[in-house]
Image (tube, rainbow, N blue to C red):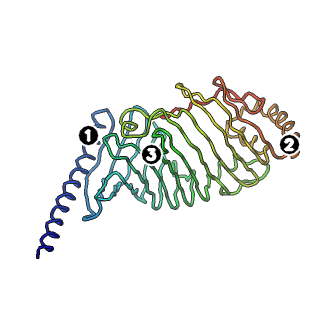
Amino acid sequence: MRLAKLLIAALMVWSLYWAAASWGLRSGIAAWFAEQERRGWQAEFSALETSGYPIRHMTRISRPALADPGTGTAWRADWLDLASPAAWPGKLDLHFPASAQRLSYFDQTAVITAQGLQASLHLAPGAALELEELALISAPWQIARSGETVLSGASLDLRMVQSDRPEVYRVTAETAELAPRAAWRRLLAANSALPEQFDTLALELTVAFDAPWDRAALEQRRPQPRRIDLELAEAGWGDLRLKAAGTLTVDTQGLPEGGITLQAENWRGLVLMAVRSGALPPSLRSSVERVLSLLAETSGNPRNLDITLGFSGGYVTLGPLPLGRAPRLIIR
């Protein structure tokens, strides 16, 4: 009898804790939306519901809509599920609907549909809710604009993991069967038609920011990159192959300094792709091809090229060739 009473008492205490934590989660979500509205955002939802008793909290936000006028970005969906262990809500999984989500940047809107799209956030205990790990995974997905699919893939795996230094994160990305729309393939095709899908697409890098990612990154200012160690970026598309690795430092204006070593197979096709995509002015194409041809000849294989993409003084160079102004690496 004594054991039974203790079990009943423990169950009652746990039930009270679960109910209080559930109420706290819903109140916290509602307060966050209200705070964003006070800051000038559009931030709304139609309902909040919690389930998952006794070991989890599963909170559904129905018809969420967020818009930040400062950056011109907006997002809305039919629902968003937040799931976490009842013992610690800082280990959070976000489940997105298979129905269409709309992501806008000023007057441009993309419609995202994905099967099993899920984001995982591991937050450190404390008021700042510092990000320890972020992951985004999905089964088949696609992005459409104006009713046309512009990008799709069979899977997606993005991860950002905090290191021993709180402002340093390791970032990895991999996607399978990435397929740009047919019009892009025709535009970018060099000597022959590009296949429908990429053969390989992967990324591994370590980024040092000027501050850790925490709740202030969403509510106030985004942490900005100050050092980027690119361990590997690899892409394979038909007979085009490109690998990259190197280190960049970034100043307070967002201007990078450093170099990225590029290894390219069928480099002439990559030059033509750069011209057709607008990355390289057509007027520079012949000069670039002449210089790169000389550099490729010295390597012993005229189809392949090892060269450095340099960033210095606000400008970009490809080997000895000036390419123009460097992009500013600023997270809005």
For mark 1, give the secondary structure. helix
234 to 212, vertically: above or below = below
Q: CA distance from mark 3 to mark 2?
A: 46 Å
Instruction: Look at label 1 and name its amino acid.
Output: Ala
48 sits left or right of 106 in the view:
left
Q: Please tell me in which quadrant of the rendered image residue 211 appears.
A: top left
224 to 91, vertically: above or below = above
**Residue displayed at 35% across by 46% down:** 65
Q: CA distance from mark 1 to mark 2?
A: 61 Å
Q: Earlier in the sequence, mark 1 or mark 2?
A: 1
Instruction: Look at label 2 and name its amino acid.
Output: Ser
Residue 165: mark in rendering: none
Q: Residues within 10 Å of mark 1 (few under 14, many from 20)?
A: some
Residue 299: mark in rendering: 2
**Dot 1 corresponds to which residue?**
34
Closer to the camera in the image, 292 or 183? 292
For mark 2, give the secondary structure. helix
Q: Nearer the viewer, mark 3 or mark 1?
A: 1
Instruction: Look at label 3 and name its amino acid.
Output: Leu
Closer to the camera in the image, 89 or 65? 89
Closer to the camera in the image, 165 or 129? 165
**Residue displayed at 61% across by 59% down:** 177
284 sits left or right of 232 in the view:
right
Residue 103: mark in rendering: 3
Q: Please tell me in which quadrant of the rendered image residue 127 appears.
A: top left
